Image: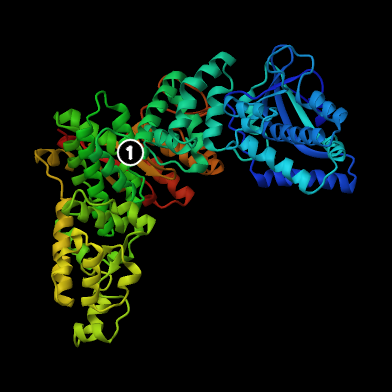
């Protein structure tokens, strides 16, 4: 690796081709970044700085004049856009010699015989927009691209501020970079990750793309990018980080924070991935499923409708589960997928209305696909029936609320105070059940052409007080936001706190939805009518989000004894227990044998505080700094000796927890009773 201090313009000068590799991200600088650069250039002019450092530029030489840009492409592209703006303004000002100088020194290789003789070669997605800026016809510009938008900013600002373009070029000449020229033996990936770039932060997906493609030969980079990565980005609206995180969590069986995402991906790749192309194939398949779910592009209208309603619950924890099912199904049945979506929606709606804590959902969906597949294969039942069995066996904060809890919660919950979209799901479901051909209430509520309104108003006038009777305050306080006092109308401002007979007349005149039918049949609106309407609507919701039917009750017996996650107690050795997984400092992880759980706990303790860990192992006979047959590596130069019983494993863990001052209940173990296993 050879690093040198260079004037940027000297670096650009000469017969050079600057190629942005396909694995690099799009040109992403925002106007605020461009504004800062322009202000810096103006400051250089006014303060008469001798030089001004703008960061590093890392490249690797190719054949002849080719330079592959590893880091610094955002700044290099932006400066090229400034030079194009200066060039065009110079032509307008009839400064032909100056325009030729800018064009030939900084923008093109003057004597190149190639069709594209431009110095800068952005990635495919940006190159067309970049080349269009050299056209004399503005209609050729790709005005939706970030390339054009930032060029236009510089062009407009230079003219608006009446900046002297020759002085501006003089200021650019004072820009200093550290040019790092990588040698063939240098590790591009390692150098790239260690750089403290002054540009935009890379997303996790940017880092992963670089990690997967950077060290490949150019032909493989191009093939991997065009065959897989470009499709992955298209399927995720150029935001693949969430999708890849889903894939990683599914395969690692643990929740992963955004901060730890990239390091976890590298660890997974290095330990588990044998074929990079197969990994890209799988992520591409996941991206196709992700796109179909997000865009609701299935053939079945009913399935798309259910997915839309599910999305309005604003809880995406279910997405990895559905993606796994879709992408791993050999012959996808949209009928069964629709049933599965209905089960998940019912599970989430019942939990939401019953106010069950949501913090368990990540854990539930993390293993729900694998749990369901295991049961389906063991008992030879459909996926949807296995799913029902697995969900019905959940308890505590992971439970599937039964009818009595759901009905009671509907009756007491102040439905009006739910989130707008979640509230809309309930009323849209009711209206659709009553009239399947009814308008799309979900969209209309979001667009505010429809709204969920009170019949008994939020503020009572004398007519309403008289209608409600002596206990009007108690009725109003307890029932104004309940389901029975709410309806859907397009008449928000018109209904307001008018008397009940006026509201009925207005709804009739404007065209009532089926959900309003009961209201229109009433001559008054008191506690009795509200309770009757509550009963009617609750019955409809109970029918829509009905408790799932399990055709084979023996499935419950099987899974009732399978998976229990319990807090660890000192002295516990888990005799006659089969391990499923554990939860500790880094969240839940699924592991199928005790040694992997033991090593996982030790690894987390080491990463939490290496000093305490090293001090402990120095005085323990269970560890060795030399490898031997049967020894298990915990970290470089540290091995666990063989032949440790479960009792001794957890005795050692107990002592380490004491040393770390970590409560034993922080560790949770998930097991299955061996003697009861079917």
Question: Is 303 on the left or on the right of 549, as rendered?
Answer: right
Label 1: which secondary element: loop
Q: Note whether residue 592 is visible.
A: no
The one of 376 and 646 positioned closer to us in this rendering? 376
The one of 582 and 228 positioned closer to us in this rendering? 228
Q: Quadrant of residue 343?
A: top left
Q: Quadrant of residue 27?
A: top right
Q: Note whether residue 115 is visible.
A: yes
Q: Position of residue 92 (x, y in %)?
A: 80, 36
Q: Position of residue 211 (x, y in %)?
A: 55, 27
Which residue: 41% across, 52% down? 663
Q: How many marks?
A: 1
Circle 1 sits on which residue?
296
Question: Is 591 on the left or on the right of 505, as rendered?
Answer: right
The one of 349 and 634 positioned closer to us in this rendering? 349
**Figure quadrant of the N terminus:** top right
Q: Position of residue 396 (x, y in %)?
A: 25, 53
Q: Quadrant of residue 31?
A: top right
Q: Position of residue 507 (x, y in %)?
A: 24, 67
Which residue: 15% across, 46% down? 548
Question: Is 659 on the left or on the right of 598, as rendered?
Answer: right
Mark 1 surroundings: few (<14), some (14-19) or many (≥20) residues within 10 A: some
Which residue: 59% across, 36% down? 145
**Figure quadrant of the C terminus:** top left
């Amino acid at each position: 690796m050879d690093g040198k201090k260079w004037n940027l313009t000297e670096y650009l000068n000469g017969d050079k081709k600057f190629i942005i590799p396909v694995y690099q991200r799009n040109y992403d600088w925002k106007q605020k970044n461009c504004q800062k650069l322009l202000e810096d250039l103006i400051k250089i002019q006014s303060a008469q700085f001798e030089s001004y450092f703008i960061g590093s530029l890392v490249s690797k030489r190719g054949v002849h004049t080719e330079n592959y840009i590893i880091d610094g492409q955002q700044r290099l592209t932006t400066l090229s856009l400034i030079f194009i703006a200066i060039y065009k303004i110079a032509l307008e000002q009839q400064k032909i010699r100056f325009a030729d100088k800018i064009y030939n020194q900084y923008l093109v290789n003057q004597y190149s015989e190639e069709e594209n003789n431009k110095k800068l070669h952005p990635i495919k997605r940006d190159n067309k927009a970049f080349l269009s800026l050299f056209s004399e016809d503005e209609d050729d510009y790709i005005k939706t691209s970030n390339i054009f938008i930032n060029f236009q900013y510089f062009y407009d600002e230079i003219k608006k501020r009446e900046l002297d373009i020759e002085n501006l070029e003089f200021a650019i000449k004072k820009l200093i970079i550290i040019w790092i020229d990588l040698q063939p033996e240098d590790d591009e990936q390692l150098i790239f990750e260690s750089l403290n770039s002054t540009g935009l932060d890379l997303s996790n997906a940017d880092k992963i793309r670089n990690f997967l493609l950077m060290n490949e030969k150019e032909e493989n980079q191009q093939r991997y990018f065009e065959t897989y990565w470009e499709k992955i980005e298209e399927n995720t609206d150029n935001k693949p980080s969430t999708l890849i995180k889903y894939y990683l969590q599914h395969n690692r069986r643990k929740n992963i924070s955004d901060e730890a995402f990239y390091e976890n991906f590298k660890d997974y790749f290095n330990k588990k991935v044998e074929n990079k192309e197969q990994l890209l194939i799988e992520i591409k398949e996941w991206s196709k499923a992700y796109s179909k779910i997000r865009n609701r592009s299935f053939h079945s209208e009913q399935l798309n409708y259910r997915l839309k309603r599910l999305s309005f619950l604003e809880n995406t924890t279910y997405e990895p589960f559905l993606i796994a099912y879709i992408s791993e199904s050999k012959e996808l049945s949209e009928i069964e997928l629709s049933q599965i979506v209905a089960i998940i929606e019912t599970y989430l709606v019942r939990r939401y209305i019953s106010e069950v804590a949501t913090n368990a959902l990540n854990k539930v969906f993390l293993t729900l696909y694998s749990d369901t597949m295991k049961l389906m294969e063991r008992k030879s039942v459909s996926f949807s029936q296995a799913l029902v069995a697995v969900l019905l066996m959940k308890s505590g904060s992971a439970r599937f609320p039964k009818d009595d809890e759901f009905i009671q919660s509907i009756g007491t919950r102040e439905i009006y105070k739910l989130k707008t979209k979640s509230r809309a799901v309930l009323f849209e479901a009711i209206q659709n059940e009553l009239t399947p051909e009814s308008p799309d209430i979900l969209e209309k509520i979001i667009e505010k052409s429809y709204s969920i309104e009170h019949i008994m108003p939020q503020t009572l006038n004398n007519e309403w007080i008289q209608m409600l009777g002596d206990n009007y305050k108690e009725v109003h306080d307890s029932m104004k936001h309940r389901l029975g006092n709410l309806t859907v109308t397009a008449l928000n401002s018109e209904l307001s706190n008018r008397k009940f007979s006026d509201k009925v007349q207005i709804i009739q005149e404007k065209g009532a939805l089926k959900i309003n039918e009961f209201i229109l049949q009433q001559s008054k609106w008191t506690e009795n009518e509200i309770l009757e309407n509550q009963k009617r609507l609750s019955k409809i919701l109970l029918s829509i989000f009905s408790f799932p039917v399990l055709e084979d009750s023996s499935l419950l017996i099987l899974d009732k004894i399978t998976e229990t996650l319990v807090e660890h107690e000192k002295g516990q050795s888990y005799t006659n227990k089969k391990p499923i997984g554990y939860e500790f400092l880094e969240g839940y992880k699924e592991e199928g044998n005790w040694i992997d759980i033991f090593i996982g706990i030790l690894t987390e303790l080491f990463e939490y505080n290496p000093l305490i860990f090293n001090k402990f192992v120095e005085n323990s006979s269970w560890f060795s700094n030399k490898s031997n047959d049967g020894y298990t590596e915990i970290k470089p130069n540290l091995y666990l000796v063989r032949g440790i019983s479960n009792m001794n494993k957890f005795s050692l863990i107990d002592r380490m927890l004491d040393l770390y001052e970590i409560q034993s209940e922080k560790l949770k173990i998930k097991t299955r009773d061996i003697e009861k296993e079917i």
